[in-house]
Image: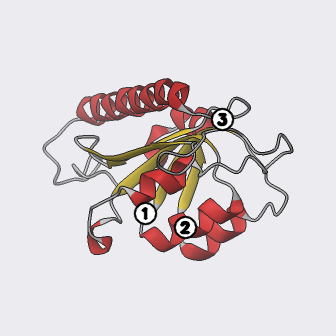
């Protein structure tokens, strides 16, 4: 990783301690936003999968959108089927993307936090949204299982929180 403060550079004035402090702070922010995302999942109407999404900037200064699983506005918010991937609900990622008002051209610095790895269809929507970073907590595989391929082809980085938290400089 290239240090934004040029740590290790012969011309650099900052110390390695500053880099460590910056990484510790970023690590704390990452953990805090994932904790908030997990708390939001309690609002999900899906009893089988409590899923929530937060979209923030890479400085962790603003929340641009949130979403959780549920039905259409004024809908019954009842699961239509208990088979895997057949809830009938709008997904948390869809709801967050629908409420995202930041212009497409300014979305490449956004991070989408999600309690679960996005399904194939949500991966397609995220790829088209302009968001380039995803952090999720729990593994999820749908029948198509194309999420990783979609993100790889579209230049979207997708990281498991537990893995990333151990190496925060990857974000």
Residue at numbered disc 3: 46
Residue drawn where x is 46% and y is 44% of the image: 67
At mark 1, the secondary structure is: loop
Give the Cα separation between the discs numbered 2 and 3.
Answer: 21 Å
Residue 54 visible from this viewpoint: no
Q: Is residue 69 left or right of residue 142?
A: left
- Disc 2 and disc 3 in contact, CB within 8 angstroms: no
Residue drawn where x is 26% and y is 45% of the image: 59
Instruction: Kindly indicate the quadrant of the structure image that contains residue 149.
Output: bottom right
The residue nearer to you, when weighing 167 against 52, is: 52
Give the Cα separation between the discs numbered 3 and 1.
Answer: 25 Å
- Residue 28 screen position, x and y as percent: 37, 26
Instruction: Kindly indicate the quadrant of the structure image that contains residue 45.
Output: top right
Give the Cα separation between the discs numbered 2 and 1.
Answer: 10 Å
Camera-near label (2 vs 3) is: 3
At mark 3, the secondary structure is: loop
- Residue 87 screen position, x and y as percent: 74, 46
Residue drawn where x is 48% and y is 52% of the image: 95
Crowd tier of the residue under label 3, counting other residues whose Cα lies within 10 Å: few below 14, some 14–19, many 20 or above? many
Q: Is residue 150 left or right of residue 10?
A: right
Q: Which mark is residue 125?
A: 2
The residue nearer to you, when weighing 97 against 14, is: 97
Residue at numbered disc 1: 131
Label 3 vs 1, first from the N-terminus: 3
The residue nearer to you, when weighing 153 against 145, is: 145
Label 2 vs 1, first from the N-terminus: 2
Residue drawn where x is 29% and y is 36% of the image: 19
Q: Which mark is residue 171?
A: none
């Amino acid at each position: 990783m290239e240090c934004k403060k040029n740590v290790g550079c012969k011309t650099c004035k900052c110390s390695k301690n500053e880099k460590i402090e910056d990484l510790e702070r970023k690590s704390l922010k990452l953990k805090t936003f994932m904790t908030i995302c997990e708390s939001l999942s309690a609002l999900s109407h899906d009893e089988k999968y409590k899923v929530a999404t937060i979209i923030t900037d890479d400085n962790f200064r603003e929340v641009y959108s949130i979403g959780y699983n549920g039905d259409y506005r004024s809908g019954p918010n009842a699961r239509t089927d208990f088979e895997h991937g057949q809830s009938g609900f709008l997904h948390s990622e869809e709801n967050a993307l629908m409420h995202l008002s930041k212009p497409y051209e300014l979305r490449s610095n956004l991070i989408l936090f999600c309690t679960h790895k996005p399904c194939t269809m949500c991966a397609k929507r995220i790829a088209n949204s302009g968001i380039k970073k995803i952090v999720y907590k729990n593994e999820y595989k749908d029948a198509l299982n194309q999420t990783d391929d979609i993100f790889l082809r579209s230049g979207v980085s997708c990281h498991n929180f537990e893995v990333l938290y151990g190496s925060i400089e990857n974000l």
